[in-house]
Amino acid sequence: KMVDFVSLLGVKGGPAIRPGSNMPTSTLIHISGKNFLVDAGLGVSRSICDQGVTLNEIDAIFITHMHSDHYLELGPLIHTAWVTGRVIPIPIYGPKRLKHYWKAFLASMIDDIKLRIEDEGRINLEKLTKFHSLEGGESFCLSDTRIRVIRNVHPPIKDSFALRFEWGKLSVVLSGDTAYMPEMIDFADHADLLIHEVMLSEGIDLIMSRLGHEDHKLKNHLLQSHTLAEKAGLIAQCAKVKCLALNHFVPDGFSEFNDDDWLQAIRKHWSGKVILGKDGIRIPL
């Protein structure tokens, strides 16, 4: 029996991948024998299997918000579980618009889906999901795990969420994509593990210079919607968490920045245990 752990399956901020970059965001939480997936960025199906977990063993999926690096592979993941023989519906918690994505995915794959139902005797793929809209401010239980949800700050998206998983005496908090928000301190209070997104201010200028075109919109989005690494350290410090893990790195995959740059920023406020996320890293709880 696997002990409780969290696997950072993909830790890159943003949807673009390049040689040497990590993969976009997804996180596997394995607690009390259950597997909860948070976000389904590109590469997620392969990454789950690399953790020794089959797609049939996913007990629930949470999508924090409707940016492609967090849900691009949701449809393909469910389809792949289906052709692996899954017949038990997957509960999916996320923004209410997620249902529209799923309907459109089914429509886009209609030829394949019909063929496999007629030719291979598969069940109706449409029945393999059960959608639940997140609102923020609620909490609910899945078996013996309590999940708490708050809205975070990720303009222009309003339906964007942070999550807290609690079971026994343990707790794990995921910030989701968010600008710095003091409310995260209360939300992450005394968590065993806080997984928080991070950004380096010097990195933003480098990203802009690499774009090949002037784009103030992207720069403004990054500054208004994401958290500088030093602020993530501040949240960990004020919330008195046991361990801080970093994900959704902006920038990622640029040789100009290394682990020391991230640590230096985090250490301005946080002197506790820190894990610099890498794809596939497993954190025992």
Image: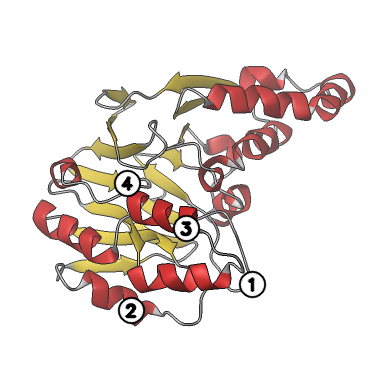
- Mark 2 crowd level (few <14, some 14–19, many ≥20, 10 Å Cα): few
- Mark 4 crowd level (few <14, some 14–19, many ≥20, 10 Å Cα): many
Residue in the image at 66% along x and 22% along y: 103
> Which of the two discs, 4 and 2, labels the residue nearer the N terminus?
4
Which amino acid type corresponds to the residue marked 2 in the rendered image?
A: Asp
Q: Distance between the Cα atoms at labels 3 and 2? A: 25 Å
> Which of the two discs, 3 and 4, labels the residue nearer the N terminus?
4
Please state which of the two labelled residues, at mark 3 or mark 2, is closer to the viewer.
3
For the question of whether residue 222 can be seen, the reply is: yes
Mark sitting on residue 261: 2
Which amino acid type corresponds to the residue marked 3 in the rendered image?
A: His
Please state which of the two labelled residues, at mark 3 or mark 4, is closer to the viewer.
3
Which amino acid type corresponds to the residue marked 4 in the rendered image?
A: Leu
Mark sitting on residue 174: 4
Mark sitting on residue 216: 3
Relative to 96, is 277 above or below? below
Label 4: element kind: strand
The front one of 162 and 29 is: 162
Q: Distance between the Cα atoms at labels 4 and 1? A: 27 Å
Mark sitting on residue 143: none
Mark sitting on residue 19: 1
Left or right of residue 184, residue 3 in this image = right
Location of residue 171 in the rendering, given as x and y in whole percent from the top left corner: 23, 44
Relative to 44, is 200 above or below? below
- Mark 3 crowd level (few <14, some 14–19, many ≥20, 10 Å Cα): few
Residue in the image at 21% along x and 46% along y: 181
Q: Tell me if label 1 and label 2 are in contact, CB under 8 Å.
A: no
Please state which of the two labelled residues, at mark 3 or mark 1, is closer to the viewer.
3
The front one of 74 and 17 is: 17
> Which of the two discs, 1 and 2, labels the residue nearer the N terminus?
1
Relative to 244, is 53 above or below? above
Q: Tell me if label 3 and label 1 are in contact, CB under 8 Å.
A: no
